[in-house]
Amino acid sequence: MLPRTGLFIAIGMLLAACAGDKDNRIACPDVEVLRGLGDVTRFNPGPGRDPTDVLLEAWIDRVGGTCRRDDEDLLVDLNIRVVTRRGPANRTESATIPYFVAITDLRRNILSRQTFKAETPYVSRKSISFEDVIALTIPLSPGVETDSFTVYVGLELSEEELRHNRGKLKN
């Protein structure tokens, strides 16, 4: 169904462009799309699970951004690109795609977690992509390095959608 399902299995990528001149560069946190939460296939209510029952497919297509440091905080501008495709069972003109961004420390303690919802109008198109820029502020303690954090991104899935994704991962 989704051509990119395998692409986002636990990717950890460094934020590519850290702000500042070469004498003032800082290390940015890793960014990871969580395994099994990088895509979703949403079906019509009921038992049908064949391609004609698909309401929409969506996947995280790209994650990146920039970071800089002020006096006490690490400031991250995180870019998240999501693509969504209307399925044959969908008769609506838009879809709501919820996703989350979480920040953890080195011990994987969750420091913050926010949920975002993007409304995607299909209009006359079958698929559409959107890109959000999320401004993250990470308070820094003395002695804590700027790359001591990980930023996790994923789609908010129902239990049924998560089971469906886990089933695809086993195959």
Image: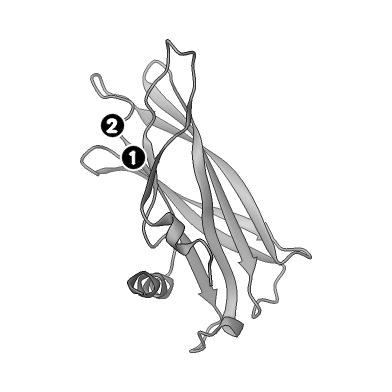
Q: Position of residue 82 (x, y in %)?
A: 57, 54
State the CA–CA distance, disc 1 to disc 2.
7 Å
Q: Tell me the residue at 79%/65% (across/down).
A: 124
Q: Can you tell which quarter of the image residue 105 is in? A: top left
Looking at the rendered image, the quarter that the C terminus falls into is bottom left
Q: Tell me the residue at 25%/19% (across/down).
A: 142
The residue furthest bottom is 47
Can residue 69 be seen at all in this image of the molecule?
yes
Q: Tell me the residue at 39%/15% (across/down).
A: 71
Name the residue type under label 2.
Ser
**Which label sits on residue 150?**
1
Q: Position of residue 47 (x, y in %)?
A: 48, 89
Helix, strand or loop at disc 2? loop
Helix, strand or loop at disc 1? strand
Q: Position of residue 56 (x, y in %)?
A: 59, 70
Q: Tell me the residue at 43%/55% (across/down).
A: 8
48 vs 171, nearest the viewer: 171
Name the residue tied to disc 2: 148
Vertical placement of residue 35 versus 138, above or below = below
Name the residue type under label 1.
Thr
Left or right for 35, reference 52: left
Label 2 crowd bin: few (<14), some (14–19), many (20+), radius 10 Å: some
Left or right for 138, reference 135: left
